[in-house]
Image (cartoon, rainbow, N blue to C red):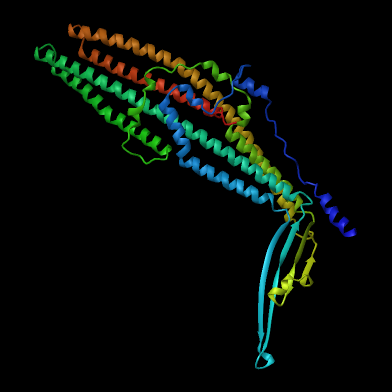
Amino acid sequence: MIKACSLLIPLLLASCTMGPDYERPVFWEDKEIESSLEITADSTPIHKNWFHVFKNEELNRLVDEALKHNLNVKTAISRLRQARYSLNIGKVQYLPMIDADGDYNYKYATEYGEYGNKNSFYNVGFDVSWELDIWGEGRRQTENLTAIYQSTAADLDNVLLTVTTEVASNYFAIAVGLEELRIARNNLAVQENILELVRDKYKSGLVGEEDINQARFAVENTKAMIPDLEQQIKVYENVVAILLGRLPSNEIYADKMKNAVKQKFDYDIKKLRQFPISVVRERPDVRAAEKLLTAKNAKIGEAIAAMFPNISLSGALGRQAHKFDELNYAKYAVYGYAPMINMPFLHWGELWNKVKMNEAAKDEALYTYQNVMLEAVNEIKNAMSSVENEYRKNTALKNAAADMRKVLNALKAKYKEGLIEFGDLLNAEQNLLTAEANLVKSNGQIYKNIISFYKAVGGGYY
């Protein structure tokens, strides 16, 4: 009875857990963040398939393929598996461990004469060891490993979000390149027509050689732009191939694409301010930073628990005999047990300094967490304003391109009638090329900014 009680007392003490329990720090109240971001009362959850808003089947297919085959995604998944196995290992460290063992020992002593002395010995049994988690060191260790596992899971979400946004951004970059290439080729055709017009006038003695040179310069200058645009498209196609886990090849994704940036994307800007405030705290990178803070907090408890005595129990149960068949008999049974207590005595401040070191590490993780959250709010705010401002800019660029097109058409008629110099027509044509290119870039920038917004709010990974 006394022995049983002596074993029960440590078990009752095992409910003790040293160190501070984790509590989420509140740097800013939700109302403060809502006020900073000017979020409306109505909120709609962000879905992981947010890119479906573009209604582009080819983009949807590419994203799905990238999430399955991207090597960064596979690497993050492998890290998550490692963290899970590490957690599973840590969970059982303070449970009783049982090992089965057996051995055979043969000894021959020559000192006993011609025949010597032969001795054989068989041993089989079980060894049991158990370090009691009296002060909660094991529980804090499990808490630490659990937080690391959760942080790794958040890192995986962040990789998935990054891959999705990279595929979408490069997809629309290809679309911008294609549209710029189309505009350049159309303008090249216009410039070549103008060159023929100038040549006719030159043959008739209506213009000088300088007009021919200027017209030819415009043609050659536009021709020089086309290889750069084609190369730019190829670079973005290669990036998409890498994101999909493929080798860069001659496959032209552009040929399979619907040119989405020819027109401005019609997006309901009100949605920018209709997301739940929880996305700020649950954004993958913010979540990962908080879980690392949780892990550092648990390490403090581990360090404190290491300053107290620990108790371990060990025992053995088995059979020993000189002959193998004798192991079947109960009279050859053996057993033993060995409780042990180990108490730190003189470590010259080592254990205390480990506690203080882990407290400082927690402070570092706390400031990192606060900074990541602050950056998250900043990115969301900038992303919202970028979308809104680009739409305003796009309207002005569209009007400017339309006006410049009218100017060019009017000047063409005047030039045919000999009312203006060729330089005026050339300037108007170059201005139209610039205006149309700027409009296309703005159309593409709208897509890019919307993608940045969904990345900023966590892309549904919360």
- What is the quadrant of the N terminus in the image? bottom right
Does residue 224 sit above or below 6 in this rendering? above
In this rendering, would 382 be left or right of 360?
left
Give the camera-side residue of 129 and 176: 129
- Residue 277 image position (x, y, % from top left): 63, 24
Give the camera-side residue of 60 and 32: 60
- What is the quadrant of the C terminus in the image? top right
- Residue 234 image position (x, y, % from top left): 33, 33
Residue at (70, 71) in percent of width and height: 123
The furthest residue to the right: 2
In this rendering, would 27 be left or right of 460?
right
In this rendering, would 126 be left or right of 379?
right
In this rendering, would 49 be left or right of 258?
right
Residue at (62, 40) in percent of width and height: 150
Figure label count: 0
Determine if residue 104 is in view: yes
The furthest residue to the bottom: 114
Does residue 367 sit above or below 456 in this rendering? below
Displayed quadrant of residue 414: top left
- Residue 284 image position (x, y, % from top left): 58, 34
Determine if residue 358 is in view: no
The furthest residue to the left: 204
Does residue 184 sit above or below 306 in this rendering? above
Give the camera-side residue of 318 and 77: 318
Residue at (50, 34) in percent of width and height: 162
Displayed quadrant of residue 393: top left
Does residue 243 sit above or below 328 in this rendering? above
- Residue 44 image position (x, y, % from top left): 59, 20
